[in-house]
Image (spheres, rainbow, N blue to C red):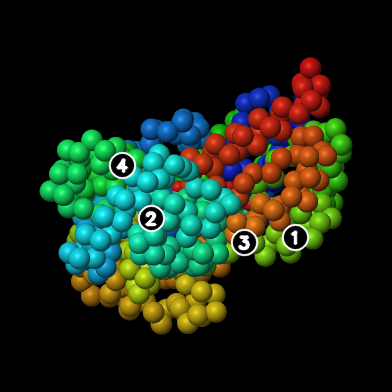
Amino acid sequence: MTQAVVVGAGLKGIAAARALALEGCQTILVDPAPRLGGVYATIPWEGFSLDIGRHIFPGGVPATAVLQDLAGAPFREVRPRAASISFGCRTLDSELPDFTHLDDDARGALLADVLDHAVRAGPEAAAPPCPHLTMAAQLEHRFGARAAAALAPMAAKILQADPAEISGLGLLPAPFTRLRLADDETTAALKRVPAFDRVLQQINLTGSPSSDPAPARHLYPASGGMGGFASACAKRLEELGVALELGRTVRALSPGARGGHLVLLDDGRSLSPDIVVWTSGAPALAGLMGLDPAPIEAEARPAPIVLYYFDIPAQAATGLNWVWDFDPDHLAFRISVPSLIDPANAPDGRHYVCAEVPVPLDGPVFADPAAHAQTVWAEVHAAGIAAGPMPERFRTMKTPVAYRSCTPAWREALVPLQERLARHEGLEMTDEFLFGAAPSVQEAARAVSTALDGPSAARLAG
Ligand SMILES: Cc1cc2nc3c(=O)[nH]c(=O)nc-3n(C[C@H](O)[C@H](O)[C@H](O)COP(=O)(O)OP(=O)(O)OC[C@H]3O[C@@H](n4cnc5c(N)ncnc54)[C@H](O)[C@@H]3O)c2cc1C
């Protein structure tokens, strides 16, 4: 039987371990944390089960079936009420930057520029994010120069990195693939002109929020929030025969040329798998393979986030579930009420608000988050998420690396590691910059099938 080790028990590692077990491999899943799930966790606090930020699964994509199988119980379908804030104004039922709040001249010039650009660029404008372009260039490629310039400070706030420095892949966690640029009447008029209608569809410009299909169907675990989902994953993996090695670190890795790798754990045990799927980032793997991780690390830009959790009376929640705040001079970029999705995650009569605040590591908010709670609460209030005075009970949580962006030079910095990996069949690494549940599941499937496709794996299976 083919032996497999998966390193890292976040969603990518969980999905990889499941896929390997279903292929009949004897699989071990290793993670230094005492529980699996990575960022899918539940923090108990005053009777609440807090998720780490706003997390929700996409419905209606192929990855949903995998998530569903891991959950072991039907997800609840949610259609949360969203809004967005741009240029100091709130737009209900939209998760997009909304340029219709600009004055007439600015809005007209922007719309003309975007349409002109889209007509010139043709379908190319809608190409998926490119790792070799900077995010600034990617935005310009998609929407033209004016819109790109307007979006740059919004992107810099969310990603805590200069869009001119990071790769176009930065678009993945930022909701900038569509914009709201025109009111209903203008959009309807444009759509009557076939050339503009094609362009509007091509670059996904939207008119009124009500004609916007977002928020689409979303899914949420039936009980226990994202931590409950992670526990269900542990159960499902054990059912599939996966051995969980939690609280364990990989100390050393000696890859064999044709499978037969050696993995040394920190408790002194050694494993001899045919396949290793690494889901814990390239720098750590480079270090284990005797390469200098510094050149790779230098091309990553971590985004620190401070999470603010406010305990509010249920009647203070307005029903609005999440708000994207694109204004660069506001602290929060996303404010949500996850317990509106599953009230069981809050004590009776209470809800919790979660504000995600991206800030520099060396700035005053990261140094003393509590001192800024009043400002964040004022933003919660202005977003229309909750009413009433600043709650007495709140807590903060610092996440120094909530997520990371890479520079366009990342792939180049990775070449020595990739060359080394190519010499060893059955040793595969997932792409750490693929963000979100569905891309994570797809990436895990790709890594597993590549690892299994190696001739040595075929030999072993045969
Ligand atoms: C605040 C926040 C909000 C988010 N919101 C959304 C959202 O709304 N929608 C969405 O789709 N996605 C969202 N995401 C992204 C989503 O959570 C991630 O894309 C996904 O969970 C990543 O899974 P992963 O396995 O790559 O990483 P992780 O969950 O980070 O797991 C990595 C695992 O590797 C382990 N590890 C680290 N170093 C080592 C090592 N040296 N050896 C062994 N193991 C190691 C860690 O312990 C961890 O368990 C959000 C992320 C954050 C942080």
Label 2, residues with CA under 10 Å away: few <14, some 14-19, many ≥20: many
- Position of 5 compared to 146: left or right? right
Q: Which residue is mark 3?
A: 300
Q: Residue at x 31, y 56 (%)?
A: 113
Q: Are marks 4 and 2 in contact (CB under 8 Å)?
A: no
Q: Residue at x 20, y 71 (%)?
A: 388
Indicate yes or no: mark 2 CB to ligand 1 under 8 Å: no
Label 3, residues with CA under 10 Å away: few <14, some 14-19, many ≥20: many
Looking at the image, tell me whether mark 3 or mark 4 is earlier in sequence order.
Answer: 4
In-front residue for pair 375/443: 443
Badge 1 element: loop
Badge 2 element: loop
Residue 338: x and y in percent read: 35, 54
Answer above or below: position of 1 versus 354: above
Residue type beneath disc 1: Pro
Of the two numbered discs 3 and 2 in the rendering, the one whose residue sits closer to the viewer: 2
Badge 4 element: helix
Q: Which residue is mark 4?
A: 199
Q: Can residue 156 be seen from the camera position used here?
A: yes
Residue 322: x and y in percent read: 30, 56
In-front residue for pair 256/373: 256
Looking at the image, tell me whether mark 1 or mark 3 is earlier in sequence order.
Answer: 1
Label 4, residues with CA under 10 Å away: few <14, some 14-19, many ≥20: many
Separation of marks 3 and 2 at Cα, in angstroms: 26 Å
Q: Which residue is mark 2?
A: 144
Separation of marks 3 and 4 at Cα, in angstroms: 34 Å
Looking at the image, tell me whether mark 1 or mark 4 is earlier in sequence order.
Answer: 4
Residue type beneath disc 4: Val
Separation of marks 1 and 4 at Cα, in angstroms: 44 Å
Looking at the image, tell me whether mark 1 or mark 2 is earlier in sequence order.
Answer: 2
Q: Which corner quadrant of the image does residue 140 belong to? A: bottom left
Q: Which residue is mark 1?
A: 293
